């Protein structure tokens, strides 16, 4: 096993993760800094994620209540991004150790990948559920039903894409066929 | 030098501590509605006043003085008791008889009340038959002498005409005036042996008939005056004659305010007005603010049971109409700082209706956060919920109490045809209903209790 190829995979995977992952990092930073009364984000949360009528009736200004929601989202996106990074790197490194020597091995590689991806997505679902539906965070009470749906859909799609780009670029060349559309990207032969 | 530094340090420490304390806002700013209602809102003077005793002299009352074999006759003893109690509670006792007119009685006539002779009619048979007792005249006298206690012994059968139009006004007017002055009316009913003629029974043809076969029939003692005197008379009669069974006894108190007291004034709200489980909640404490408003403070979760229970005995005057409708005035304040030392201000929430009221015979229950349940509130916030409980409408329990002994003019002829051993009182329920209506008119919305819950909602 050549360490050079593994390091190359790690670097390529990191590049792939960074292509979309920077958005999550930026979003986490925004949330970690807390609400700014003038920001559009604060208003967007109010209009789209939370039970705005209940919040208004509580009498507490939304900006004050939003502090804990910002904290929740900062922690949740950190957990999700970390999971995507860890999963993508694990697969990228692990792909070098896949050794299938049988007819139709591409199919077996794909099965490995889809099972691994399934586990990753289950973790994403678990993280989203833990933050938005469990009693772990008080701020989860502010979220409306449609807000939880919005967060869930965006998280599932976005963090899958972050992970996907990470594994697409980082998977060992011989196992790249395991990745969905792995052989169809135009630059595949150069990586 | 060192000593000076220590002194300065201590002063600064004290100042900072007092500042921290003064900044603490563990409850929001609000005005406490203090009730002026005390144990009894009447002018309870210890001075003995005048007592007017009125005996119904209509001929039908004779039946109470003559023993009926197999039936207990309490009339004579109770008349004795009334004379004795009157002497005890009053400085001057004025005895009068009434029928078609009210007339003063000579002292020597008073002892005759227990005899058949007292009720004999000296007029013509036309004027002696179907006499109606002009009870409205007595209410007028009571209005003229509001400070006196008025005791009326009567069969209380009233004709329809006495309860409508101008004759009804002659009852309602004085009664309104008396109730507004804080006086009350006690109705004591005693089912007694009867051996005589019940006349003045209206027929469907518009005539009057009579009934001779009744063996029992109720008579009544109306007491107009202070609640204390009314209760004293009632208690004495119960103690002397009905201590073992109240089967033949009924009592109702008509008062402008059937509310016994405000629970805050007498500091009767305690920890155990809330479920016992609440006292085991985290950070539970129970204190009075300004020596008036009790506050239950605790850390609760979305499953915390919040019920405030009060015994109706504590709030309703015994024997009175009671309260048929209660209402609450409620307010909630919120803050996202759960520790008192961090709270700078509270925000008034607009939750609308939050709690409901339910009651049974013995208990009034405020189901706190039933309409707006705790599970819909946000965790991580502190809530201050203040409730004022009001009596909104007087009840009708006294009507129900006497319904069993009452018969309407439309039903009395049919009742007579069944040859009852025990005869009922004509229009008794209507009469009590008039008294209740007047007490309802003079009733004012009354604050019964105020309290608050101050809690942090946790997981």
Image (cartoon, coloured by chain):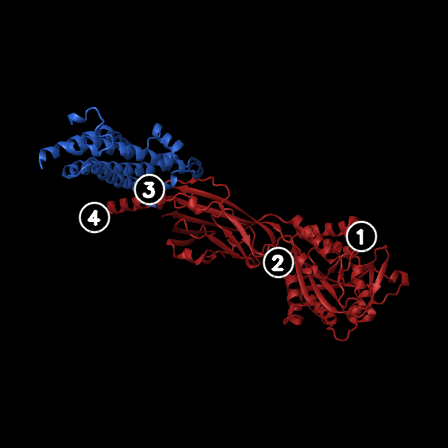
Q: Secondary structure at mark 2?
A: loop
Disc 1 is attached to a residue of which chain?
B
* Residue B360 visible in rendering: yes
Q: Say few, some or many: other residues with alpha carbon within 10 Å of mark 2 (under 14 / 14 to 19 / 20 or more).
A: few
Spatial distance from mark 1 to mark 2, Cα to Cα? 37 Å
Q: Is residue B48 left or right of residue B266?
A: right
Q: Which mark is residue B44?
A: 2
Q: Are marks 4 and 3 in contact (CB under 8 Å)?
A: no
The picture places residue B363, in percent across and down from the top left corner, at 54, 57
Chain that is blue in the image: A
The picture places residue B213, in percent across and down from the top left corner, at 81, 68
Query: Foreground: B436 or A52?
Result: A52
Spatial distance from mark 1 to mark 4, Cα to Cα? 96 Å
Q: Earlier in the sequence, mark 4 or mark 2?
A: 4
Residue corresponding to mark 1: B161
The colour chain B appears in is: red
Report the mark closest to the observer, 1 or 4: 1
Residue corresponding to mark 4: B3
Image quadrant in which you'd find residue A102: top left
Q: Secondary structure at mark 3?
A: helix
Disc 2 is attached to a residue of which chain?
B
Q: Is residue B448 left or right of residue B91?
A: left
Query: Foreground: B359 or B180?
Result: B359
């Amino acid at each position: 096993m050549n360490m050079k190829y593994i390091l190359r995979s790690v670097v390529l995977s990191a590049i792939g993760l960074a292509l979309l992952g920077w958005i999550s990092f930026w979003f986490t930073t925004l949330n970690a800094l807390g609400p700014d009364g003038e920001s559009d984000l604060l208003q967007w949360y109010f209009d789209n994620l939370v039970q705005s009528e209940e919040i208004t009736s509580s009498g507490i200004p939304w900006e004050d209540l939003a502090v804990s929601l910002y904290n929740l989202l900062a922690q949740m996106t950190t957990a999700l991004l970390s999971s995507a990074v860890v999963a993508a790197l694990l697969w990228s490194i692990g792909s070098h150790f896949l050794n299938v020597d049988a007819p139709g091995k591409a199919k077996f590689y794909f099965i490995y990948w889809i099972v691994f991806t399934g586990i990753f997505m289950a973790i994403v679902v678990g993280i989203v559920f833990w933050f938005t539906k469990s009693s772990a965070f008080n701020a989860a009470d502010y979220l409306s039903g449609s807000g939880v749906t919005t967060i869930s859909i965006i998280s599932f799609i976005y963090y899958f894409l972050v992970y996907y780009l990470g594994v697409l670029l980082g998977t060992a060349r011989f196992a790249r066929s395991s990745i969905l559309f792995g052989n169809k990207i135009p630059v595949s032969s150069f990586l | 030098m060192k000593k000076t530094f220590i002194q300065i340090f201590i002063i600064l420490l004290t100042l900072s501590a007092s500042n921290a304390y003064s900044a603490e806002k563990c409850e929001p700013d609000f005005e406490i509605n203090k009730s002026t209602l005390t144990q009894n809102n009447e002018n309870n003077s210890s001075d003995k006043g005048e007592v007017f005793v009125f005996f119904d002299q209509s001929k039908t009352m004779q039946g109470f003085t003559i023993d009926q074999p197999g039936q207990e006759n309490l009339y004579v003893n109770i008349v004795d008791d009334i004379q004795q109690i009157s002497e005890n509670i009053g400085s001057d006792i004025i005895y009068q008889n009434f029928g078609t007119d009210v007339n003063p009685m000579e002292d020597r006539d008073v002892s005759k009340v227990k005899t058949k002779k007292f009720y004999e009619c000296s007029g013509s048979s036309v004027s002696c038959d179907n006499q109606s007792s002009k009870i409205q005249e007595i209410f007028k006298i009571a209005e003229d002498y509001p400070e006196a206690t008025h005791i009326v012994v009567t069969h209380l059968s009233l004709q329809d005409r006495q309860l409508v139009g101008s004759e009804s006004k002659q009852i309602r007017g004085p009664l309104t005036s008396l109730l507004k002055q804080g006086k009350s009316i006690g109705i004591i009913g005693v089912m007694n042996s009867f051996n005589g003629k019940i006349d003045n029974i209206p027929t469907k043809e518009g005539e009057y008939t009579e009934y001779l076969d009744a063996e029992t029939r109720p008579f009544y003692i109306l007491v107009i005056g202070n609640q204390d005197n009314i209760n004293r008379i009632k208690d004495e009669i119960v103690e002397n004659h009905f201590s073992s069974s109240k089967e033949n006894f009924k009592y109702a108190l008509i008062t402008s305010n059937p509310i016994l007291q405000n629970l805050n004034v007498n500091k009767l709200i305690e920890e155990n007005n809330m479920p016992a489980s609440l006292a085991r909640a985290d950070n539970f404490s129970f204190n009075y603010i300004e020596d008036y408003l009790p506050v239950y403070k605790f850390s609760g979760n979305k499953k915390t049971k919040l019920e405030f229970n009060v015994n109706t005995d504590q709030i309703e005057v015994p024997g009175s109409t009671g309260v048929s409708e209660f209402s609450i005035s409620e307010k909630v304040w919120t803050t996202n700082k759960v520790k008192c030392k961090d709270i700078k201000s509270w925000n008034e929430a607009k939750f609308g209706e939050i709690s409901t009221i339910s009651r049974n015979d013995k208990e009034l229950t405020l189901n706190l956060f039933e309409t707006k349940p705790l599970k819909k509130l946000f965790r991580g916030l502190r809530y201050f919920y203040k409730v004022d409980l009001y009596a909104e409408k007087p009840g009708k329990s006294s009507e129900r109490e006497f319904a069993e002994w009452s018969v309407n003019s439309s039903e009395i002829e049919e009742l007579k045809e069944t040859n009852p051993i025990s005869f009922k009182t004509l229009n008794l329920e209507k009469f009590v209903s008039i008294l209740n209506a007047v007490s309802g008119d003079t009733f004012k919305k009354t604050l019964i209790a105020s309290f608050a819950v101050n809690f942090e909602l946790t997981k």
